[in-house]
Amino acid sequence: MRFCKYHALGNDYLVLDARHNRLPSAAERRRLCDRHFGLGSDGVLWGPLPANSPEFERLAEEAGVTDLNGAMAGLRIFNPDGGEAEKSGNGLRIFARFLFDQGMLFDAPVRLLTLGGLVEVQVLAGGQAVRVDMGRVSFQAGDIPVAGETGEVLQRSLHSGGREFIYSAATIGNPHCVVVIDDDSVDLADLVCSYGPGLECHERFPRRTNVQFMRIHDRETIEIAIWERGAGYTLASGSSASACAAVARRLGLVEAAVTVRSPGGELRIMVDENFGVVLEGAVTAVADGEARDEMLAYAYP
């Protein structure tokens, strides 16, 4: 099984070219992502799925997208636990860089189909950076979804791990739970590692959720730490940065243009008046190689 590996601010993915690789099973995806028994990554990207192919049409049906509006190809995104993710800002940037490296994409914007809907991507600076139009953020309970809530889920209360949290919820094709932290002495990474697992699987979130703890530095800069659904603690996440910037904007804490800092680096986010989000950040090529059948078949001790 041939692969290409990239990272976006330390958030790394394995790209499996769907033109040459079958879709690995959930167990194989878990093995590929394992950092001790496999190749190690924060997820697997399987694509491109050519427009009008059976796999593309199946993805469009699952995504509920009927107006494909000139989509170039489809992409399926998988977490290290083997489950599928609707959308990933970093994954999309990495996949756009992969298409660029394969000579399939140049510097003009193109549209890609994901389980979370259509997304526009554009390669910049000769592949060193990628811009992604992530779509519109919704804070509505029914869209995210959030059980037991109605209307916009902003600054609501829930209990987890013996503690009360004031949270806001959002979706940008996948669900997010954002907690603003005012105490400058608290380490956000420690906090999200302690409480992220419980919040991810809280009964309030029937599809589980991505979790972010966010600190506002000023009206143009925020800092976040991320517990990713199906992946755990991660150094960066494009959809998490987008959701946090949109929540901060909706709460009146930041301007439209925001720098989002995470342990892996910085993303630039633009949030318009309708909470449409565009993000821009770096992508780095890591390696090309072949995953051996022996590795995929090895039984854990």
Image: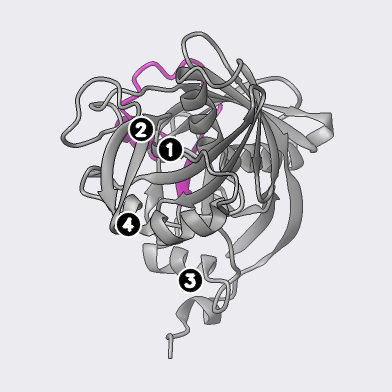
Q: Which span of residues is magenta-colored?
A: 55-78
Badge 1 marks a residue whose secondary structure is: strand
Number of the label disc, if any, that sits on residue 178: 1
Give the CA distance from mark 2 to mark 1. 6 Å
Res 153 seen here: yes
**Reading the chain from its start, which is encountered first: label 4 or label 2?**
2
**Reading the chain from its start, which is encountered first: label 4 or label 1?**
1
271 lies above or below 147: above
Q: Residue furthest top?
A: 273
Tell which of 204 and 133 is nearer to you.
Answer: 204
Amino acid type, residue under disc 1 in the picture: Val
Badge 4 marks a residue whose secondary structure is: helix
Q: Quadrant of the N terminus?
A: bottom right
Residue 27 magenta: no
Residue annotated with mark 4 = 198
Taking the spot 47% from the left edge, 60% from the top edge, the residue there is 193
Residue annotated with mark 3 = 31
Residue annotated with mark 2 = 169
